[in-house]
Image: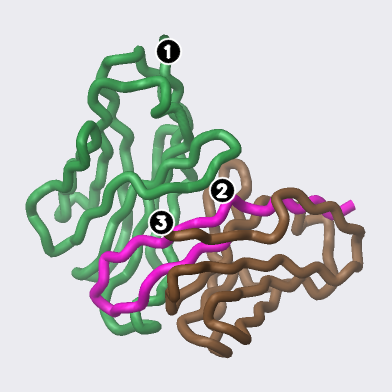
Amino acid sequence: DVKVTQSSRYLVKRTGEKVFLECVQDMDHENMFWYRQDPGLGLRLIYFSYDVKMKEKGDIPEGYSVSREKKERFSLILESASTNQTSMYLCASSFAGAYSNQPQHFGDGTRLSIL
Amino acid sequence: AQTVTQSQPEMSVQEAETVTLSCTYDTSESDYYLFWYKQPPSRQMILVIRQEAYKQQNATENRFSVNFQKAAKSFSLKISDSQLGDAAMYFCAYRSAGLSGGGADGLTFGKGTHLIIQP
């Protein structure tokens, strides 16, 4: 089975801190994604990566950056955390393929609170 | 940009009955994929069923089936013989096909439907 592991289930940080959310997948997937999940808004794409050192902005990239130095690891960075970034963050991965119907596999999520 | 609309924030069904969750989407593309994901309380999001837009036949997975109406841009999920374990948030999602990003385009999600199963 595909395993997508997020480093923390719950995280509490302070306003202005630099925050790192880590995600590791074990299926050699080319694609990795970071989503934010808020009640009543569903999931929204923050950033994605289709290869090592490659990244693309999603729908809501403001206030975030990402890093992908190794194929299996994709990090989300909050440069200066703000209270409006309190949310559930979900990492996902999938095989590449322009015409592939391969689904994305999700981690358990990190519930981040910014105080 | 594509949008996905789930018009039912919450649905309730008696155990063993059938329920249908609605999903509509807006796109100008002709080739794409549609997915239903399930997210149980405090648990991982998992794939329920997928549909390729070029396929006319509706996808089925055991008790789960879809009614895909491409012209109407509708993609509803039917759950037959509902079970207590089906209680969850259900998300409809869209992904573009084609060469954009090598297939790495993220999913566009609806806001979700909270499904309650009454024992």
Give me the disc on residue A1: 3
Q: Amino acid at mark 1?
A: Gln
Image colour assigned to chain B: green
Colour mapping: by chain
Give the label, 3 or 1, closer to the camera: 3
Image colour assigned to chain A: brown
Q: Residue furthest left?
A: B56
Q: Which SS class for mark 1?
A: strand
Badge 2 density bin: few <14, some 14–19, many ≥20, Cα 10 Å: few
| C-alpha span from label 3 to label 1 | 31 Å
| C-alpha span from label 2 to label 3 | 29 Å
Marks 3 and 1 belong to one chain: no
Q: Position of residue B119 (x, y in %)?
A: 41, 10
- Determine the residue positioned at 43% across, 79% down: A30
Whether the magenta-drawn stretch holds residue A99 is answered as: yes
Q: Position of residue B83 (x, y in %)?
A: 35, 21
Residue that label 1 marks: B118
Up/down of B85 relative to B110, above or below: above
Give me the disc on residue A41: 2
The reply, left or right, for residue B104 in relation to residue A23 is left
| C-alpha span from label 2 to label 1 | 26 Å
Label 2 close to label 1 by CB (< 8 Å): no
| Disc 2: host chain | A
